[in-house]
Image (tube, grey):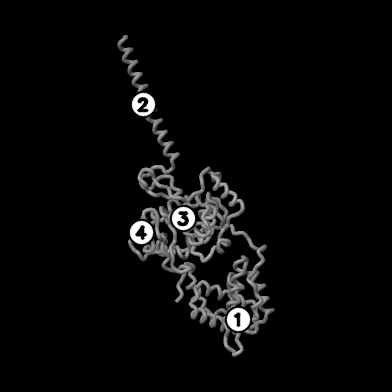
Amino acid sequence: MAQNDIYGSKERYEKFLANLNDITKKPKSKKRIYYCKNPGNILYFQKLAGHFEMKNISYIRRVRMFHVLKLLTYVTEKNLEKFDRDDINKMVAYGHTTHKTINSKRDFIKDLKCMWRVLFPERDHQARVDETLTPYVVRHLSRKIDRSKEKRRNDKLTWEEFQKLLNFFSEDEQMQAYLMFSVESLGRPQEILYTKIRDYEFHDNFARVMISEHGKEGTGVLQCIDSYPYIVEWYRKHPLKDDPNAFFFINKGKRKCHEQLKNNNINGRLRHALKLLAINKSVTCYSLKRNGVTFARLRGDSDLDIQHRARWTSTKQLKIYDMSTQEDAFKLELQKRGLGITEDGKQQTSATKTCQFCETVNGFTAEFCNTCKRPLDRKKIQEMAEFSDDMVNNQLFQRFARLEKMFERVVDRKTI
């Protein structure tokens, strides 16, 4: 049986099936325009649902396939079984007007061909269904889209912007833990948000986080080294840390308190933070994975290391997730030669900071130790030491000045 996801796809799918008989009615709401114009096409929704149950397909894919079928039954009043290539071409042309991005256009054609193989399969010379053949009416469709129409995502963060975003949530340990862990581990939002207390194995300076469920490539391990201080800090304040079956990332609001934290909640906080920080970019939970890949490449990590960390089968996915530019590559070369610095004069690094006094491991954005409250920057330690010496010298000078005045008074009295 397929499992629900953080997007609530199971509820959407079951609600659609429950109201399937009403799909032929024209919606009164302006937000919902699609409906089935030919009642005979309802049969194909039911047939597709049976295929979903047999294949145990994920709910999010079921909802997407139903959306494609609903789009087809809205555009035409013909029965889908009577479609020819001209009808399919008209459907694809209309689909291009509703799907704006390159990926959505490509997925639309992919789902259309897959759906046609299920509903109207080709047959061999003995009239048996042949699943290996693509039906003739959709065989000419190609998933290749003109890349000149591709638009740049406005979700790429610079390292300085990510630091500002992380410091913005300095009072929210959970958000800091999620942001840093997502960028470092390159985990998907659903994989991270479905982790539970029992999935975290803490060591002295790192943690092993197991993906025990809802992993796109099955179970696995997420890396937690640079994000370790933030994860530990949130674990210490986790209200349900004694319950191994509790979700690690939970809702802390009044509504649905201590329930699983959802991606919509995090996306809303990110939008609010970016607005207050005057960063005009559309960053979501999934953007953190792409930015994590970009930061890793600019830091000099090998493609093989990024592949294993992201749990990909090959390095081909780097072309999709890497958002670095030629300017970024130039800065990377400067860093390799010891010349690359950020705007504030500091090297770009996400390494943890160890306190020189109590040896506590702190996050890379921390300025003071979480345990002893001493500064972590050597320059600040030196400045405080110099300031302390100046204060001591100043106090001694004031004391000598007072003693000198007292001595002068004593001498004046004796002369009198």
Q: Earlier in the sequence, mark 1 or mark 4?
A: 1
Expressed as whole percent of the image width and height from the top left, the position of residue 77 reads 64, 81
Q: Quadrant of residue 239?
A: bottom left
Q: Nearer the viewer, residue 26 or 369?
A: 369
Which residue is denoted by mark 3 in the rendering?
Answer: 180
**Mark 1 or 4, closer to the camera:** 1
Q: Earlier in the sequence, mark 2 or mark 4?
A: 4
Name the amino acid type tagged 2: Leu
Expressed as whole percent of the image width and height from the top left, the position of residue 196 reads 39, 64
Which residue is denoted by mark 4 in the rendering?
Answer: 239
Query: Quick check: 151 above or below 76?
Result: above
- Which mark, by number, is residue 396? 2
Evaluate if marks 3 and 1 touch, with contact meaning CB atoms under 8 Å apart.
no
Element carrying mark 4? loop
Query: Quick check: 115 above or below 194?
Result: below
Mark 2 nearby-residue class (10 Å; few <14, some 14–19, many ≥20): few
Q: Earlier in the sequence, mark 4 or mark 3?
A: 3
- Which mark, by number, is residue 133? 1
